[in-house]
Amino acid sequence: MHQEDDKRAFFETVTVERYQEGQWRQELDDVLVEVPVALTYNGYPHVVIMSTPRDIVDFVYGFSLTEGVINSLQDIRSISIHPKENGIEVNIEITPLSFSRMEGRRRQMSARTGCGICGLDSLSAVVREQERIGFDFKLDEMAIDRALKDSNTLQVMNQRTGGAHAAFFVSRTGEILLTREDVGRHVALDKLVGALLQGDYNCQDGFILTTSRASFEMVQKTVAARVGMLVTMSAPTSMAIKLANRMGLKLAAFTRVGKINLYQG
C-alpha cells in the first residue's frame, strides 16, 4: 500500500514591490512552492531533489523507472511519504534485485531543481545502457498543433505562478491525456512517466510534449518510458540530438502552432 500523497499547497502568497509605468506599488503575488524531497530506498538515503510538493507518488515511480532503479511497477513494494517542516521524506521499499541494480549506479547527492544527472560517480555512468525504441512513431503536424493550442489551459500551476514546467502525454490525434507540472522540468517529466506507469496507457500510442528545452536527460527519460517521440517547446542540446538518433527516438523542438523543427526522423 502507498501512503496518500502530500496535499500541501503548490503556491504561497508573498508581498512584492512592483515597478510599472513609472511607479512603485506594493502588491501580493503567488509564487511556486519548492521543497527538498529526500528519497530513501530500502532504508538507504539515495537522493534529494528539489520539487513542488504535489504528485509525489507519481514522482517516485517515474524517477525510479527513468533512472534505472526499477523495470516495472511491481518492483516497488511500498511507498510512505512523510511531510516535514523543511521538506518531504519518502521511504521506498523495492525488490532485492532492483536494489542491487540501484547500487550499481549509486548516488550520494543533493540535486538542484530536478537535476537529471548531478552527482553520478563517473562520466561513464551518465550514458547508461538502454533498449533502443523498436517502433517508428509517425509524426502528425495537426496533432502537435492541437496539443499546443490546448496546453496552456491545462497548466494550473503555471497560470497561478508563472513558474512551473509542464509535461503532457498526448494521443496520436493530439488529445492531451495526462498533464503534470513542477518547478523542475525533469521532475515534471518524471511525474508524468510515473502516472503513465500506474495508469492504463499505451505509451507507444502517443507522444510526450514539454514546455522546456530538450536536454540529454529529457531524451533519456523519454526512452526509458518507451515513448516514441519527444516534442519540446524550446531548444534541443547537441547531446540530446545524438542520443535521440542513437535510440531511435523522434525529437522535435522549437515547436509552435504551425512550426516544428525535427531533429531525428
Image (spheres, rainbow, N blue to C red):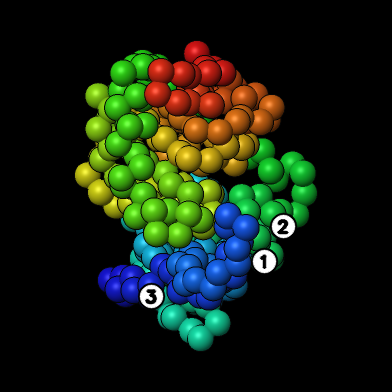
In the depicted structure, whether residue 199 falls above or below residue 5: above
Q: Nearer the viewer, mark 1 or mark 3?
A: 3
Residue 212's x, y, as percent?
53, 40
| CA gap, disc 1 and disc 2 | 8 Å
- Label 1–label 2 contact, CB within 8 A: yes
Q: Which residue is mark 2?
A: 119
- Residue 205 shows in this picture: no
Q: Which residue is mark 1?
A: 110
In the depicted structure, whether residue 175 falls above or below residue 115: above
- Identify the image quadrant of residue 148: top left
> Which residue corresponds to the image point at 59% horizontal and 41% vertical from the top-left?
217
Marker disc for residue 8:
3
Looking at marks 2 and 3 on the same chain, the residue that comes earlier in the sequence is marked by 3
Looking at marks 1 and 3 on the same chain, the residue that comes earlier in the sequence is marked by 3
Question: Helix, strand, or loop for circle 2?
Answer: loop
Looking at marks 1 and 2 on the same chain, the residue that comes earlier in the sequence is marked by 1
Q: Name the side, left or right, on which 23 lies relative to 265.
A: right
Q: Residue furthest top?
A: 265
In the depicted structure, whether residue 80 falls above or below residue 212: below
Amino acid type indicated by mark 3: Arg
> Which residue corresponds to the image point at 65% horizontal and 60% vertical from the top-left?
112
Amino acid type indicated by mark 1: Ser
- Identify the image quadrant of residue 200: top left
Residue 172's x, y, as percent?
28, 25
